[in-house]
Image (cartoon, rainbow, N blue to C red):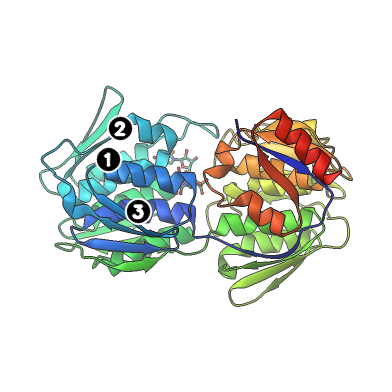
Amino acid sequence: MEQYVIKGGNPLEGEVTIAGAKNAALGILAAAVMTDQEVTIENVPNVRDTRVLLQAIQGIGASVRYIDEHTVAICGGTINPNNDLCVDDEFIRKIRASYYLLGALLGKYNQSKVALPGGCEIGARPIDLHIKGFEALGATVTIANGMIQAKAEALVGKHIYMDITSVGATINVMMAAVLADGKTTIENAAKEPHIVDVANFLNSMGANIKGAGTDVIRIRGVKELHGTTYSIIPDQIEAGTFMVAAAATKGNVLIKNVIPKHLEAITSKLNEMGATVIEYDDSVRVMVDKRLKSTNIKTLPYPGFPTDMQPQMTAALALSNGTSVVTESIFENRFKYVAELSRMGAHIRVEGNTAIIDGVPTYSGAAVVAPDLRAGAALVIAALVANDFSTISDIKYIQRGYEKFEEKLRELGALIEKVETEKDIQKFKFKVS
Ligand code: UD1
């Protein structure tokens, strides 16, 4: 089983280039099947989640052709709508976001069927808002035998109010609505950068979507979509993770290929903690030369502080001088990693959706297990700080969303290796001691 072995203590220094946004890619790859023409998508991050979604897309009959590591051509014209348009359990278990094919196929063929996503490591994650949105557009949604099926005679535009701001429901309903008859308005829509990216992509295919990035999205249905070439935005969370890793290790890192505006919530918290963050056109530099200061954070929908940066920031706050309070307001179960961080010496008390953190001067190395993607990244950050050796297992979660994570960290001076056996760990220890 693959794991990371890390000898911490080195400040991260140098430059790192950020990949395309995973969460934007998941929406865009699914939306690509909505035309019968070929679509070329650039800057696709080469991470497990995008690869699995591409397999699911092939599974429904679309053709998928890799042009290079980060460019893929998809053609939805080979899908046979007379076949059962069904995305099965195998994919949805590996990657929740394959449920974007529900909205994409419903929009294009007026029918789709996807295995029902269950709960997961960070909370129950219902999909009632997606269903409500499809129903508002005229679809009948049924759940049976672990599958969710949506069918419509014809989709008709509607005024839809989202009871909760949901990234997934906004994207799914937006996809279903682009080929519907007439106008759809999504109110209380999510405003995350990847919503805007999916909307821009659909518009480049001929859709008519206005207002993405605000809380009211207006869609005028069009008859059909056409082929396009589109480049995905940089990954805000990968960038944020390297920003926090630079700060926690008291390093100096230039993080390239980013949109600084998307990072503002993270930048402003790092500033409060005493880090220097310099913004350039498409890069940011993070520098820290003394112990970080405590601060309070509450996760919120964009432009608030992203829940996907909460574990990494908690790992940095656990080293800061003073007491910090982190409140998780999006997912109910996102502090499971705290037990692992405590094994590395953190002093964190969790009460409901709040973590009260008393900063410690440093971490000590330990054998820990990544409970999910972002928590895994937080444990890597802690291990990069610890003066001794750590191992992090279950890195399959980390590989879902970070491209070449260990290679990028190594280039910044980190002592980290992906290993499989105890012998490999011993070899690494011998090499770096
Ligand atoms: C997306 C991101 C995930 C990020 C999250 C919040 C992708 C692939 N994943 O997840 O990385 O952590 O946004 O920024 O883009 N909810 C409902 N009913 C629904 C849908 C959601 O009650 O039908 C609730 C959720 O339980 C949660 C909140 O709404 O409490 C926000 O979730 P949502 O924005 O939908 O997250 P995802 O799209 O699943």
- The residue at the point 72 percent across, 29 percent down is 422
Q: Quadrant of residue 272?
A: bottom right
Q: How far is the residue under mark 3 from the one under mark 2?
A: 17 Å
Q: Secondary structure at mark 1?
A: helix
Q: What residue is pinned by disc 3?
A: 29
The one nearer the camera, 220 or 338, is: 338
Which residue extends farthest bottom? Answer: 281
For the residues carrying marks 1 and 3, which lies nearer the camera in this image? 1
Q: Tag 2: residue type?
A: Asp
Q: Amino acid at mark 3?
A: Leu
From the image, which quarter does the C terminus lie in?
Answer: top right
Q: Earlier in the sequence, mark 1 or mark 3?
A: 3
Q: Gap in Å between the C-alphas at discs 2 and 1?
A: 9 Å
Which of the 4 image quarters holds residue 331? top right
Task: Name the residue tied to disc 1.
Answer: 59
Residue at horizontal 52%, vertical 33%?
123
Who's the residue at 64% across and 33% down the image? 420
For badge 1, the amino acid type reads Gly
> Mark 1 to mark 3: distance in Å?
13 Å
The circle on residue 88 is: 2
Ligand 1 is within 8 Å of the C-beta of the residue at disc 1 = no
